[in-house]
Amino acid sequence: MESQQSHNHNQLHVIFLPFPSPGHMIPMIDTARLFAKHRVNVTIIATHANASTFQKTIDNDFNSGYSIKTKLIRFPSAQLGLPDGVENLKDGTNSEILGKISHGISMLQDPIEGLFQDLQPDCVVTDMMYAWTAEAAAKLGVPRIHYYSSSYFSNCAYHFIMKYRPHDNLVSDTHKFTIPGFPHTIQMTPLQLPDWLREKNPATAYFEPMFKSEEISYGTLYNSFHELESDYEKLSKTTIGIKSWSVGPVSAWANKDDEKKANRGQIEELGKESAELLNWLNSKQNESVLYVSFGSLAMLAHAQLVEIAHGLENSGHNFIWVVRKNNRDEGENSFLQDFEKRMKESNKGYIIWNWAPQLLILDHPATGGIVTHCGWNSILESLNSGLPMITWPMFAEQFYNEKLLVDVLKIGVPVGAKENKSWNSISVEAVVKREEIVKAVKILMGSGQESKEMRIRAKKLGDAAKRSIEEGGDSYNNLIQLIDELKSLKKSKALGEKAD
Ligand code: UDP
């Protein structure tokens, strides 16, 4: 058989352009790998430090015979006065650094457009955050596929709330409105919307074009699956009128063995720490451990960390808690270190600093639930493991995702988060108290009827997720159909050029 690596002229060539934050990059890299596994010639464009988080996996795929490679571009660190390797939103630990990183990302537009021209792909799949790529693709005469890294539900909510602005005439930010146009009655408060949507501010001028760019793209790719949110898939396709494909859960599809699960999304090997963690999990009863993670970006106030620590301890349940080090004052470090020591002694809790092998933890039989900030990737990964959730949304579209989990799918216990704040603005006012945390943990991890029913529903969805990525499943078929469609477009374009 001919090696896939020596790609030929007739092979479909697709460029993937991920946005540098883990929640955007991880699913896009998995999706790019799935395209390559279905005999597409794939090029991923990334800067050096970002590429180093996934290059090993890409090399493995390449060495297994798939036509996939990374095209590196230089991040303008020196020009911006940033240290080497600071190229990802998660490195934006204060607003000055974050501002520079964001500026650096916008400076990449010209070099990336240049690469599009050089590489002459047949299609570009670009993150939702790169609105400008819709026009860049049009200039090249190839389809741009908008990669939306969250739920259909949330994209539909954005669409209808932007269109009808149901929150505009309320007397206060804590009064409820109903999302217009939805098949379910979903109520929210203006405070749960991102600030740029609540009222116009400088960020509005960034986000609105993002949604507009979707409308002029060829279609939208979702890391979702049909049985999870079919009503909203339909709403998006028919009422809103955007062509789309669900091809998820891509993490489960692309990472079928444990080694890849441990390595995903970070540079260092997890070897020793993973082994210690697995030993700890192995010592616990099935479904007895709660996994607590707020994703890759969220920054929590010290007062909030204290409430979480006490809430988890007071709940009496086993837990794993991922805590991001934030170089704040000594007081915080010593509080957390004392807490970690106490948890080691009681053997009730396990602290992971900075980055957890999330897929490994979620897949372990001892894990029985998750506290999640409602980042879409974490939701899908938990669902794939059949786990119910405690929902604790913080920023962006996460409050919509909470509604999907709690009101529509009925697999989530809300902790009672009230306010949507930018992920890097640490909110001291909106602290969720330990009593509320204990209450939610007891409902989810206890043996009551509510928990049992949620568990059954989550498992059913987990089974549906697995079926959807098997040969003949919905996501599987969607991916094949999309690739076939892109191949026919390539063919007709070539015929058109010949005729000219
Ligand atoms: N993640 C991980 N380990 C961590 C934190 C995050 O593997 O300690 C992964 C997680 O599995 C998910 C992604 O990073 O794939 C986070 O994306 P999500 O949409 O959940 O949240 P975000 O980080 O974008 O807020």
Image (cartoon, rainbow, N blue to C red):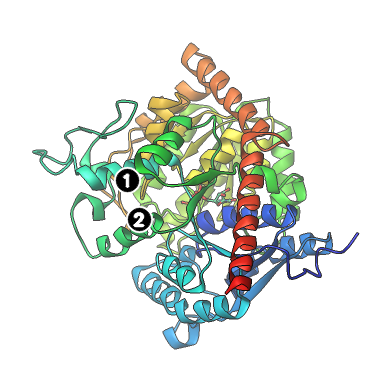
Which residue is more in the foreground, 290 or 75? Answer: 75
Dot 1 alpha-carbon crowd within 10 angstroms: few under 14, some 14 to 19, many 20 or more: some
Q: Give the quarter of the image for residue 359.
A: top right
Between residues 253 and 363, which one lies in front from this camera angle?
A: 253
Q: In the image, what residue occupies the spot 51% across and 69% down?
A: 141
Which of the numbered marks, if any, corresponds to residue 97? none
Residue type indicated by callout 2: Phe
Q: Locate the C terminus by quadrant.
A: bottom right
Q: Which residue is identified by label 1?
A: 158
Count residues near mark 2 (Cα–Cα under 10 Å), then give few for <14, some for 14-19, many for 20+. some
Element on which disc 1 rests: helix
Q: CA distance from mark 2 to mark 1?
A: 9 Å
Residue type indicated by callout 1? Tyr
Task: Locate residue 468 relative to residue 335 in the image: left or right.
Answer: right
Residue 209 rendering spot, x and y as whole percentages? 32, 62
Residue at 80% of width from left, 67% of height from top?
5
